[in-house]
Image (cartoon, rainbow, N blue to C red):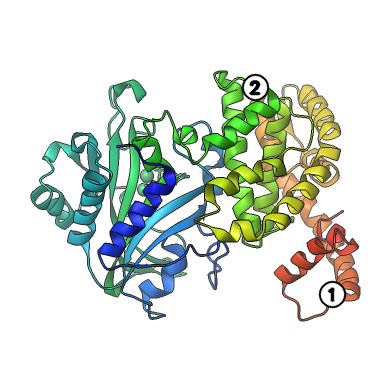
């Protein structure tokens, strides 16, 4: 049965509302009171205090469609069919209420009765010691033994907080999608067995010291990737051809008069479509480009998107022009995107313009350095720092471009050069901040103010220029 991405999200939330879950709006990408996380990367992350008992949840059962950022997956974007830096995670949660049996039965019911997925194509994994979960899959659901795999990896955690054994659900896309290796099976990194849903039976609390304490109440935390479900239901080659993302790619094709069947162009187009989604949601949640923390993540993703645009032959500023398409797809579910439309476009334009001014010269320098790298095959910390400081090349970008030519970079040398520069900037910053800002504005307010008012001296100093 065909469903749009928006319909799948809605069907999921409605299904769990019928199972007496309270639907909460997606939380911001900026974690609240959680120094162990830079950005929200899972549906459970903003709910941690409810799991640990620190706060009383508004309902013992909650369901969300959570905006997630995982920059750890950035190198996979466009190279696997299933990874994004930004994606939507559908989740149902139990705070000391239902446990394994219901979580497993409802996941199965949703996949096979609501989405009508072919039951013969579904496989699951469980933690080897978890005979309980194994039992439910086998006896309650009736899944044959050869479709249940025991995996050591099936233990889920993110920073501090609730964690525990999990059970993952995979969809077999068929042998033609596999790597063809004889050992290829569920859990293989290739595209054949697609992990669509993870059910986490969170029964421990991981402390800051890395200890695992049993939780007083046992919880359920699940996460299903919306884009992956859409790729299965819409029978697409990857998440990128689903109606959640492909309209952005079509825009890019028009812009560069490109060819989506060319493998290199295809990767570049997927990267841009992925990154503009991430950029849009990050800015709408109040993140602004900077040289540290979340702002650096945004800057890095944005500059990487600009570079891939250049690789496709796009010379003009183009990123903010893609925002309308992102809003058309996601604006209804996430009204905060439309609310901040003007700010999103302005921030993107300012940042893209700034980087475009130095990108060409920076690339010339980098190309000549790479040509000179010779047998050493390493760029020095000073060289990498110059690209960073003078030409605005995020170190990861330099690293990536160098790696394309088999050259590594001296990270320690770069870190040392960076530290020296930061010490110089700190003194200057204190000086300017005192003149421009009142002492009681928060750091985010300050950045927002500076952007609203255009790029001020304080911003420039903040950027380390
Ligand atoms: P994978 O093994 O494919 O990298 P994962 O095990 O890291 O996925 P989980 O941490 O279990 O993923 O997250 C729960 C669900 O969120 C996954 O089953 C998947 O559907 C979705 N998901 C995870 N990472 C991504 C990503 N980078 N892009 C899109 N969807 C994702
Ligand atoms: Mg992963
Ligand atoms: Mg996995
Ligand atoms: Mg998983």
Quarter of the figure that contains the N terminus: top left
Q: Nearer the viewer, residue 222 or 319?
A: 319
Residue denoted by label 1: 437
Query: 377 or 454: which is nearer to us?
Result: 454
Mark 2 or 1, which is nearer the eye?
2
How many discs mark residues in the rendered view?
2
Q: Relative to 433, is 154 on the left or the right?
A: left
User: Residue 52's x, y, as percent?
Assistant: 37, 74
The image quarter containing residue 145 is top left
- Residue 463, can we see it? yes
Sooner in the amino-acid sequence: mark 2 or mark 1: 2
| Residue at image location 42% in from the left, 74% down from the top | 49
Dot 1 beta carbon under 8 Å from ligand 1: no
Q: Secondary structure at mark 1?
A: loop
* Residue, disc 2: 258
Instruction: Tell me the distance, in whole angstroms, between the alpha carbons under discs 2 and 1.
Output: 47 Å
In the current view of this chain or complex, which residue is farthest to the left? 139
Identified at 70% across, 68% down, the residue is 444
Q: Residues within 10 Å of mark 2 (few under 14, many from 20)?
A: some
Along the line of sight, the residue nearer the viewer: 108 or 364:
108
* Label 2 residue SS: loop
Q: Which one is in front, 412 or 384? A: 384
Q: Residue at position x 44%, y 32% from top? A: 238
Residue 239 image point, x, y percent: 45, 36
């Amino acid at each position: 049965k065909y469903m749009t991405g928006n319909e799948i999200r809605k069907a999921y939330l409605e299904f769990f509302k019928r199972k007496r879950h309270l639907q909460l709006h997606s939380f911001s990408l900026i974690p609240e009171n959680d120094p162990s996380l830079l950005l929200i990367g899972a549906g459970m992350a903003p709910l941690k205090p409810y799991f640990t008992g620190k706060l009383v949840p508004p309902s013992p059962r909650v369901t969300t469609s959570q905006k997630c950022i995982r920059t750890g997956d950035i190198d996979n974007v466009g190279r696997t069919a299933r990874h994004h830096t930004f994606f939507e995670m559908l989740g149902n949660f139990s705070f000391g209420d239902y446990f394994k049996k219901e979580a497993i039965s409802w996941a199965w019911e949703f996949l096979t009765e609501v989405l009508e997925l072919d039951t013969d194509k579904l496989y699951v994994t469980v933690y080897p010691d978890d005979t309980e979960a194994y039992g439910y899959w086998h006896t309650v659901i009736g899944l044959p033994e050869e479709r249940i795999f025991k995996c050591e990896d099936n233990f889920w955690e993110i920073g501090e907080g609730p964690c525990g054994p999990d059970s993952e659900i995979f969809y077999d896309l068929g042998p033609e999608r596999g790597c063809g290796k004889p050992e290829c099976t569920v859990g293989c990194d290739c595209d054949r067995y697609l992990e669509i849903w993870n059910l986490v039976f969170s029964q421990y609390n991981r402390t800051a010291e890395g200890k695992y304490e049993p939780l007083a109440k046992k919880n359920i935390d699940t996460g299903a990737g919306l884009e992956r479900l859409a790729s299965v239901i819409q029978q697409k080659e990857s998440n990128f051809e689903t109606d959640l993302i492909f309209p952005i790619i079509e825009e890019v094709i028009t812009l560069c008069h490109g060819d989506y069947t060319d493998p290199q162009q295809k990767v570049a187009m997927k990267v841009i479509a992925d990154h503009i989604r991430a950029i849009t949601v990050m800015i709408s949640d109040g993140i602004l480009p900077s040289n540290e923390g979340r702002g650096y993540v945004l800057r890095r993703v944005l500059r990487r998107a600009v570079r891939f645009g250049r690789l496709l032959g796009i010379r003009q500023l183009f990123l903010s022009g893609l925002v309308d398409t992102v809003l058309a797809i996601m604006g209804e579910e996430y009204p905060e995107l439309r609310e901040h439309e003007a700010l999103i476009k302005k921030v993107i334009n300012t940042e893209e313009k700034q980087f475009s001014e130095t990108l060409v010269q920076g690339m010339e320098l980098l190309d000549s350095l790479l040509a000179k790298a010779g047998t050493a095959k390493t760029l020095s910390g000073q060289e990498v720092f110059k690209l960073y400081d003078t030409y605005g090349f995020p170190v990861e970008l330099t690293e990536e471009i160098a790696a394309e030519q088999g050259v590594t970079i001296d990270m320690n040398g770069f870190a040392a050069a960076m530290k020296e520069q930061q010490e110089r900037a700190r003194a200057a910053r204190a000086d300017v901040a005192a003149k421009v800002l009142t002492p009681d504005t928060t750091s985010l307010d300050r950045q927002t103010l500076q952007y609203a008012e255009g790029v001020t001296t304080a911003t420039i100093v903040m950027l380390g220029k």
